[in-house]
Structure formats: C-alpha cells, structure tokens
Amino acid sequence: VTISVAKSGGNATTNLQYGAMEEEINHCGEGGLYAELIRNRAFQGSTKYPSSLDAWTAVGGSSLSLQNLTDPLSSALPTSVRVKGSGTAGLTNAGFWGIDVRPQKYTGSFYAKGDYSGSFTAALTSSNGKTLASTKVKSKSVSGKWVQHEFTLTAKSTASNTNNTFSLSFDASKAKNGYLDFNLISLFPPTWNDRPNGMRRDLMQALKDLNPKFLRFPGGNNLEGDTIEGRWKWNETIGPLKDRPGRATTWSYEETGGFGLIEYMEWCDDLGMEPILAVWAGLALNGDVVPEAELDVYVQDALDELEFLTGSVDTELGALRAKYGHPEPWKIRYVEVGNEDNLNNGLESYKSYRFAAFYDAITEKYPDIQVLASTIDMTLEGKAGGDYHLYDIPDNFITKFDMFDSYSPDHPILLGEIAATEFNNGEGIDWSDTNFSLYPWWIASVAEAVFLLGAERNADKIIGTTYAPFLMNLDSYQWSPTMISFNANPDDTAKSTSFHVYSLFNENHMTNTLPATSEDAFGPLYYATGLNSETNSRIFKAAVYNSTEDVPVSLTFSGVGRGTKADLTILTAPDALSMNEVGGQNIVKTQTTTIKAGKKGEFSFKLPNLSVAVLTTN
Ligand code: AHR
C-alpha cells in the first residue's frame, strides 16, 4: 500500500481523543477505585436491596443485629448494628472479597453509641488467625450519643494473600448494657495523593499509565436509575459521609455515596482529565418519563449542579462547595444530557421536549458549555453535540470505519461507550441472549483500533472516545469485558489488550489531521494520518484486520525528506483470541524500531495481520 500524506489541509483535533467513562458498575468504584476497604460499612439499604449484615460476622460468641434506632447516626444512615456479648464482643468484615495488607498505614474510624469505659481493638487478621496489624482505641463512647473514634493501623509485613479480615472488638463486660451500637465503620489504605476518602493507588496508577484526557461520569444506566425517584442525585453524594444516604444502583448492589460528585472532580484534577458531566434528563430505565409540565425542577437541578461545581463562592451553591473544601470553582466545558435517551421509550419525549429544555437552559446560563445529547438518533439543536455508543462483534467495528466521514463538525460527537464485546458470529449481538467475553481479546482490540482510526481521521468532529465499562472487580461484576480488571490484590490487576491499543494511540497524540492519498482502498490496512504541532512530528496510525499476509507499506509525508528517522511501534499478540487476564501476564507484544526514510522520503515497512502500529517521525 502506497500512501502520500499532505503537508497541510487537515483539521485541528479536539485534543481529547482518548478518555475514560465511569459509572457504578462491576464494583469499579465501591470495592474498586474508591479505596474504602470495608464492605457495607454503614448498613445502607433500599427497597431494592434492603439493609443487611452482608460482609459482617460476629466476633466469638457475640451477636449482631441491625437496628433502626429512634436516634440514628443521621437521617441519611438510619440503620446501625448492635453488638451484644458477655466477654470479648465485636464484628469482623471480609472487605470487598478480601483485604490487601502490606507494610503501610491504614486510616480508620467508626461511630459508637453506648456507655462504655474500656477500649476497642481494631485489627487486621489473616485467614489462619495471624494478627497482621492491631491497635487499641480508647473509648470516648457515652450513652445516648453517637461518638466518632479514629485510629490508624500499621501492618509490619505483606500478608501472603488477600484473605484477610478487619475486626473491631471490645470488652462487653464493661459496656453498661452489655451491648454497643456501631455505624459507619471505615478503613482506608494510603490513597492517591493522600486524599482523605480517596482513591486506590494502584488503580489510579493504571489509569495514569493510560493518561485519559477526559472522564465521562456518572453513567451510564446508573445515572438514569431504575425509576425516576431512583435516579443518581448529585446533592446526595456531597458533604460529610454520615450525610450521604447512598442508593440502589441499577447494577444489583447498593452504593454508599462515598464516591460522590466532589470525588469525581478530584479524580479529574488528579489525572488532568476534562470532566464530561452527565446530568439526569427525565428518563428512568423502566421507561418512565417526566412529563413536559413537570420537567422544570429537573432542569433546575442540573443548573444547581453546575452552580455547585462552577459558581463563585458568592453564589449559594458555590459557597457550599467551598465549605466542603473547594473554594476554587471547577471548569465544566461539556455537559451531556442523560444517557442513551434513544432507548427505553425515551426518544420521542427527548426529541420533542426533554433535550431542548436542558439545552436551552444550560446554553443560556453557560454559553461556553458544549451541550451533548445522549444519542445521535435525532436532529441535534443549535450547536448541540451527540454521544454514540457501540457494543458489537469485532467484524462490525470494521464496517463502521468510515461512519464519521460524512458527519458535520457543527455537531461534534462523543464516542462515550465503545467495546467489542462478543466473538465474531457472522451477525452481531443478540441483546436477548448475550454472550460477552470476560476480557477484551486481541482480534477485538484490533477491530476497535480500526474504528478508532475512523474516529481519528475525523478528530475535529469526534470529541473523544472511551471504552466502557472501564473497570471490573472480578469478584463481583455485572458486565464484561472492561478496559481494566482487578481484584483485592493490586498485583493482579490486568490492563486489557484494548488498554494497550488505546495507550499507543493516546501516547502518539495528533493535534491536527493531515489528508492522505492512496490508490489502494482501505482494508485490510486501515490508517489515520496527522501531526503533532508541538513536536512537529508526522504521525501514521494503522491497524491490519483480516489479511492473509503481511501488508507492505510505503509511506511519504510531504516535506519529510530522505534520511529522516521515524519510530515505528507495532503491537501484536500470540493469536486472535489471546487475552490479558487478572493475575496473568501481558500478552501484547510491543516492538519499536527506528527506521529511515529512503531516497524519495519514503518509509518502507511491513505490518503483519492483526497488528496495530504507529509511526512517528523524529
Ligand atoms: O456500559 C454498560 C452500559 O451500557 C451502560 O450503563 C449503558 O449506558 C450502556 O447500555
């Protein structure tokens, strides 16, 4: 394939080509990125998932019972646990399917109520009973009042596995009533940037390695909720943890609300990601839609959320943000209205009044914000952008390579959820009977690369792309495959085959596309061409899908002469079905060579079948 790349004539890209998407699914936040180690720390429940003692067991002969006291810890956390016994009493937590213990300091706290003059013991213990860390906490507990106790635990060595538990015990003979009430029992390992209520360091490092340029949050289906009342409510995820009620996710578990709006924004700050904030748009997953006459309150709620995030401290909600530790307003440049409003009976109302109501109100108050619809299945108003999602078999990603060539830059599109999920079957996904892979696999990642190249060729119109879902705790998940998979053990985290593809494309960022001409049609070689104006490097990104032999490439960049050097990186894998698994090795082979332009300035090389490659001139 002979390709000539022009010197100019392309378009400036949005500079956000690759990002991340987050919603509470797969325990990606709770039991994942959100570093809290105690599962069911505040016995939160809902009609859908009633409060329970899940993850807790009693110490020794003591007994545990859930209580809805007349004087609860807070109205947000009405349920607590009563621990009753005669001698040593207490409760043990199994963590999010294990607790990683290594020589580091753990920061904990709990609320207790009851007249108790002794001390508490907080400990981390291995499955064979070895104490890994232990500390005594002097009781401040009094009758009739919830009192918070804080402690630290320092482990001296690394536990041999993650089958460890946390326990909190006390001498029940010194408790006046023979019992004590507890709530909000929390334990954190060191977090990313040492933020209180922060994020798991190893998973943040994995994300940092990918260097996502944006974060689309907080969903996904989980934003929508099963019912209108069950929607994700930003104002219930801020402030002290004891005032966050949590909610039933749409993904079969209760969330605590600990990983809330401010934590999302801090996450963006910590990794330099552009926030793409999704606001609730009047549609729930059960198909209930807010009628036009009742929509105002939800539009106002979105405006309030924006004031909370971006308003000066002189505004009511900006002042609230300052009270919660963030006087400096955040900048929001993108707001997405809803999630997949083309589904669940939503499109008609979205087209006729829901989207317009949010679009008008947001653009009137915040003219600089790019408002995005959650679909491209409609004519987009004004300067609105859209969001396109694609879950499919690998072959169907190839047919969409040129999908964006005819789109207008007037309505930029976010590729907000993209993943090849099911093995090639000649058709596509049967949504009534899905058969998704546990992990991304190599041919799927190459097919995604082809689709990403189609987007990069149009990177003035495509705001950016993110894989979804992004993270999965292998011990409790609802949707695979994901970009990164993990369990309680940081050493087991798997960066998927797709991670390596996205990472290569992201590292070699194009600030401008450059037009290319060739007499050969696309396929089996697909490519995008451009430059990075900061380094003045010319860039060629490519993928080979379904070729019977290596593809010879002769590539010239106008203005790049004989002898110019370029780095050529080629990703391959042992076979089409190879995967990166939790606890396993990375199977993606990365080979970088430096090559020189020939007499006519041509770079000559061969790309094997099922490879993904980037060439950058030095
Ligand atoms: O990413 C999993 C789900 O797929 C999202 O919640 C939803 O937006 C999409 O249908």
Image (cartoon, grey):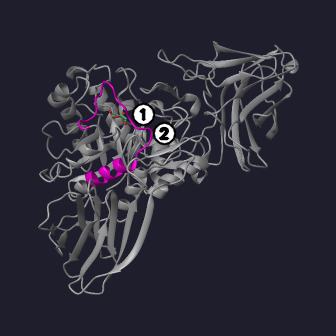
Q: Do the residues labelled 2 and 1 touch (CB within 8 Å)?
A: yes
Disc 2, SS? strand
Quarter of the rendering occupied by the C terminus? bottom left
| Mark 1 within 8 Å of ligand 1, using the beta carbon | yes
First to last magenta residue range: 426-452
Name the residue rendered at 54%, 23% in the picture.
76
- Residue 116 location, x and y as percent? 82, 23
Quarter of the rendering occupied by the N terminus? bottom left
Point out which mark residue 479 bears: 1
Disc 1, SS? loop
Using the rendered view, name the quadrant where residue 243 is placed.
top right
Camera-side residue of 498 and 335: 498
Q: From the viewer's perspective, is residue 241 above or below residue 559?
A: above
* CA separation in Å, label 2 and label 1: 8 Å
Residue wearing tag 2 = 472
Point out which mark residue 451 bears: none
Is 127 positioned to the left or the right of 428 in the image? right
Q: Could you tell me the amino acid type at mark 1?
A: Trp
Q: Could you tell me the amino acid type at mark 2?
A: Met
Camera-side residue of 606 and 306: 606
* Residue 390 within the magenta-colored segment of the rendering: no
Is 513 positioned to the left or the right of 252 in the image? left
- Residue 24 location, x and y as percent? 45, 34
* Residue 434 within the magenta-colored segment of the rendering: yes
Quadrant of the displayed image that contains ligand 1: top left
Q: Is residue 368 visible?
A: yes
